[in-house]
Amino acid sequence: MAEEARVFFLRKRRERAEDTERRALLEGLGQTRSLIAQAYAGFNAAKDPDLIESYVFEINALQARYSYLLRRVKELDGEAQAQPG
């Protein structure tokens, strides 16, 4: 019985950690989406070729970050579904 309780509490602790990570990832997705919108607005308003180029790099970097965060959320969701209830 003690072993079952220990396993239960370890599972709950892991689930809480995953929930915390998932919330942080979702928050990061929202922030990154906002930064992408801001970068596109700057790109659309820019006239200087160097500034335009900097916005292109910024947008590409933010899109890469967004892809990473989205992939991590999907991985966590997949892990949660794969775990026995």
Image (tube, rainbow, N blue to C red):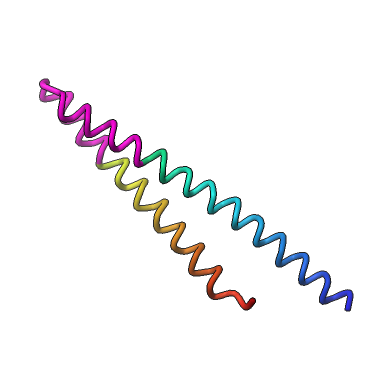
Q: Main secondary structure of the magenta part?
A: helix
- Single out the residue that lies furthest toward the top: 48
Is 39 on the left-hand or right-hand side of 84?
A: left
Quarter holding residue 28? top left
Q: How many marks?
A: 0
Which of the two residues, 55 or 45, is positioned nearer the viewer here? 45
Which of the two residues, 49 or 75, is positioned nearer the viewer here? 75
**Residue 37 percent across, percent down from the top left:** 28, 36
Q: Quadrant of the C terminus?
A: bottom right
Quarter holding residue 33? top left
* Figure check: 20 above or below 52: below
Is 53 on the left-hand or right-hand side of 26?
A: left
The residue that appears at 88% across and 79% down in the rendered structure is 1
Question: What segment is highlighted magenta in the picture?
Answer: 33-59
The residue that appears at 48% across and 43% down in the rendered structure is 27
Magenta-colored stretch includes residue 42: yes
The residue that appears at 78% across and 65% down in the rendered structure is 9
Quarter holding residue 43? top left
* Figure check: 80 above or below 66: below
**Residue 4 percent across, percent down from the top left:** 82, 76
The residue that appears at 36% across and 46% down in the rendered structure is 65
* Figure check: 47 above or below 3: above
**Residue 51 percent across, percent down from the top left:** 18, 24
**Residue 78 percent across, percent down from the top left:** 48, 69
Magenta-colored stretch includes residue 41: yes
- Single out the residue that lies furthest toward the right: 2
